[in-house]
Image (spheres, rainbow, N blue to C red):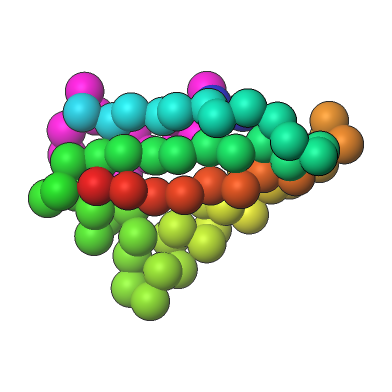
Amino acid sequence: MTELLEVLVCALVDSPDEVEIVDEGVRRDTVYLKVRVSPRDVGKVIGKHGKIANSIRTVVNHAAARQNLRAMVDFNS
């Protein structure tokens, strides 16, 4: 799932080399992932009213569901 998340986020930002994805592990059938991007790219990842961030969460959550897991994606700058 980290690879999928990395592909999605790197396609949106201007500086994909500054994208960092941290897999915090699985607890109670939930995968916790944190995404860090450059401060100037935060708006591109979050989107207006969080629409892009919610779309990314939805795609990753569907990928996790194929493995009988849930995914929690947190965006930080």
Q: Where is residue 3 in the image (x, y as percent from the top left)?
A: 52, 23
Residue at x 38%, y 76% (from the top left corner): 49
Magenta highlight: main SS: helix
The residue sitting at the bottom extreme is 49
The residue sitting at the right extreme is 68
Residue 4 visible in the shown view: no
| Quadrant assignment, res 43 | bottom left
| Quadrant assignment, res 51 | bottom left
The residue sitting at the front extreme is 27
**28 and 18: which one is in front?**
28
Tally the marks. 0
33 relative position to 43: left or right: right
Q: Where is residue 34 in the image (x, y as percent from the top left)?
A: 45, 39
9 relative position to 17: left or right: right
59 relative position to 14: left or right: right
Residue 32 visible in the shown view: yes
Residue at x 73%, y 41% (from the top left corner): 30
Q: Position of residue 13 (x, y in %)?
A: 24, 42
Q: Would you place residue 50 above or below residue 2 in this image?
A: below
Residue at x 45%, y 28% (from the top left corner): 22
The segment highlighted magenta reads: 3-17
